[in-house]
Image (cartoon, helix red, strand yellow):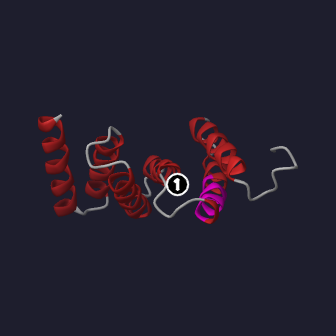
Amino acid sequence: MADSSLGDSHYEVAALLNNRALLYRLQKRYEEAEADYLRAIEIAESQLDSGHPELATMLFNLARLHDERGQFERAVPLFARALAMYETTLGPNHPNVPLVLKDYASAARQAGQNELAEELDGRLQQFQQDG
């Protein structure tokens, strides 16, 4: 897929896999999307700092895939990881935070985690009031 000089575990390969997975997701080719997201995350985890925003984006993308497929129990922990990474590395007021909060709250609600969903909704409302 990428230039052979990069090797299969180079971060650029992870970025390409993430982008292809997004395309697969839009085409509703969910199994292929999931495989690419998982491989991209595996590479990113080995190449980037544990809280790197690019890794958070890949986790967020995989969470959204699970959410689209109705796999809310699988989406919730991924949204949680992505949110924690964004808040730690980019700060709690970064524009990615409300995007994750919104989808995380929705998935939590669909997974029957109503208390968590209400907490996240409250944080989102606070974010919107402060912003």
Total tally of numbered discs in the picture: 1
User: Which residue: 35% across, 60% down?
Assistant: 80
> The residue under label 1 is which amino acid type?
Leu
User: Which residue: 74% across, 59% down?
Assistant: 9
- Name which quarter of the figure residue 82 lies in: bottom left
Q: Is residue 61 left or right of residue 5?
A: left
Q: Is residue 56 magenta?
A: no
Where's the C terminus, which quadrant?
top left
Percent of width and height locating residue 129: 11, 36
Percent of width and height locating residue 27: 62, 36
User: Which residue: 31% across, 61% down?
Assistant: 111
* Magenta segment main secondary structure: helix
Q: Is residue 21 left or right of residue 10?
A: left
Where's the N terminus, which quadrant?
top right
User: Which residue: 25% across, 55% down?
Assistant: 109
Percent of width and height locating residue 84: 35, 59
Q: Is residue 86 above or below residue 129?
A: below
Q: Give the magenta part as a residue range.
A: 37-45
- Name which quarter of the figure residue 25 lies in: top right
Residue, disc 1: 55
Percent of width and height locating residue 104: 32, 52
Q: Is residue 59 left or right of residue 38?
A: left
